[in-house]
Structure formats: structure tokens, C-alpha cells
Amino acid sequence: MSQDWLGQRERSNRLACRWIVWVALHFGRAAARGLLYPICGYYLLFSPQARASIRAFLSRVLARRIGWRDLFRHYYCFAATVLDRVYLLRGQYDLFDIDLRGAEIFTECLARGQGCLLLGAHLGSFEIVRATGFAGGFEVRILMHEENAPMIRDIMRDLNPTVAETVIPAGAPDTMLKVKECVDRGGMIGVLGDRSFPEARIVPCVFLGEPAGFPAGTMRLAHVLRVPVLLFFGLYRGGNHYEIHFEWFAEEVNIDRAQRDQDLQRWTQRYVDRLEYYCRLAPDNWFNFYDFWGEKSYGSAAADPSVPSRLLATSGRDGQPRRN
């Protein structure tokens, strides 16, 4: 996993962000979405690094030449999901048409009365999944790294301080304590397993036909918690339509100390295979705007088992759910 995303800072300013939020709340979703066209045009023209990264991803997943229209659509999809977070954080769920797939898996896990790990990626909207939990009265906490988007983070906290308090910062001294307390209460921990940190251990995997690095901490967390693991992806399908997909990943993720590296790679590759499936299902929903396949993404950290894993975050190619 490339570290480049940590160096990317928000290009907009706080006043502009708050103005868009004000328009969204006072004039409605349609008016606010109209503002996304010039905003996306700006980023398309003046963000060459992100533009190149999107092109590299789309060319792999679509296996064709990528044009400006493809790039704009990708930016717009991302901007639309960010805007929709405003309404989701305000509890305005009635604005959206949500197609819940694999609901029986989600219900079965909750019926056990034990916690579970929700494993996703920066694909689509995690906010739509968290909103589903809140609407159903379930405790859902998100383990994430917020430092590279402080303006959006602060605005979201202003919109709904209660929801903001459910975020567990990755890498904090009390991170594991908060995670364990949540699952012990029967709650769910949502983690996104497709980004790493400079000092994190990396697991080399094959993603869209080429080597890429994924954080080892994802599967190590699942192993330590010893709870069921569900995959989740909240895919944006245009307009006000979202698809939330749940599927079993494992009853437990077991990593044998005697073959730790092999087990970590096997479990992580299984996650990567499912991520690839959903990327192909909704290519415009992939929101990692940096060189994902760069040399740094699977270099020295992958080969050095002594590198500490600071990432406590989320993590079959045949399109069929797998259950262990």
C-alpha cells in the first residue's frame, strides 16, 4: 500500500466546504449536487496525481483506454457520496433508496448477541452502512485514520457530534481497549482494510492482476478479536440509489504462529479477491486517489516481519460468498 495518500491534503478551504453544506441543508440535495459539476471539473483539471491514479485503476479494472468522461464520472461519484454524508449524518435516510443485499447474514450475526467485525474498503460509502446500523438501533463504531482530511472531519462532527463520537482513531493508546469493549457489548467494529501507514507491516497480494501491498494489521485484528467477520460494501449506484452488500468472510480468522506469514497472506488475499470482485461490480466507487500499485506499496515493509503494524483498520474472485 502506498504511503502517498498520507501526504495528500485537502485542496478546498473550510469556508467553501461549509458553504456547500449550507446549500445542501437549506436548498436541498438537487441544488447541492448541481455544485458538484464545477467542483469536479476543477479537480479533473488541477489534480494531475489523482487523475493519473484514477486512470491507472480504471484501465486495469475496465481493460480499455480511459477518457476524460470516465475520469469526470469517477470524481463525480466520489463527490456525490461525500455530499450524501451530510444527509446521512443528519438522519435523513428517507432521501435514499437503499437496496440491502445479504441482510439475512447481518441479522444472523446480530441474533447471536456477540460482536463482529465489519470488513470493508474505500469503495463506495461506509457512511451508508453505518447509517443502516443506527437506523436499526445497533451499535456500529468505525476504526479509521482521520488525519488526512481534517476539514471534512470537523464539518462532519459539527453535523452530528453523536455519530462523530463513534469513530475510534487508529493507532491511539486506547484503540484496542475501545474496540474490545464494543465487541464485548455485542457491537460492530467497521474497518477499512485497503490503506496502510508508513511503519505498518505490508502483506503482498495480487490485486487486479498486479502486485499491491495491503496492511497486515487488518487480519491480525480479526485474529485477536476472535469474532465473526462480515464483508460490507456500500456501493453508490447513481441518483439516490445505494446497494449495501453483506457476506460472510469467516467465523473466525485464525493465524497459526508457526506459519504466521503464510496465514496472513492467505487471509489477506481472500479479502483482496472479494475487493476485486466488488471493484469490477462498481468501478466508479473506488476512492483511493494515489499510486496503489507503486513500488512503495509492497516493498521493504512486506519483507520485514519486525515492522510494527499500526493499522487497526478494515480490510473469491468468483463472485460467490465464502463462509468458514
Image (spheres, helix red, strand yellow):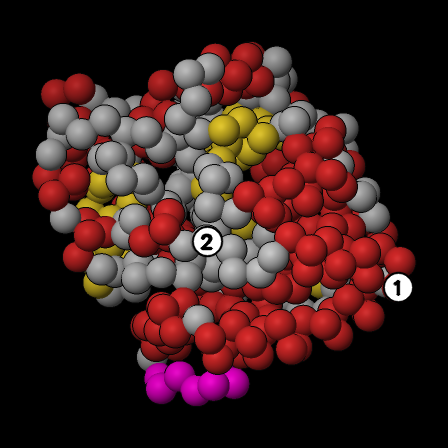
The earlier-in-sequence mark between 1 and 2 is 2
> Could you tell me which secondary element the residue under label 2 belongs to?
loop
Range of residues picked out in magenta: 64-70
Query: In percent of the image, x 52 and y 72: which residue is there?
Result: 43
- Are the two marked residues, 1 and 2, in contact with CB atoms closer than 8 angstroms? no
Identify the mark at residue 27; answer none if there is no mark: 1
Callout 1 crowding tier (Cα within 10 Å): few <14, some 14–19, many ≥20: few
Q: Where is residue 203 in the image (x, y as percent from the top left)?
A: 22, 42
Q: Position of residue 282 (x, y in %)?
A: 51, 66
Query: In percent of the image, x 52 and y 61: which residue is there?
Result: 11
Q: Position of residue 93 (x, y in %)?
A: 81, 48
Identify the mark at residue 83; answer none if there is no mark: none
Relative to 227, residue 152 above or below: below
Q: Mark 1 or 2, which is nearer the eye? A: 2
- Left or right of 108, for residue 255: left
Identify the mark at residue 9; answer none if there is no mark: 2
Instruction: Work out which residue is located at the far right of the displayed protein and give it.
Output: 26
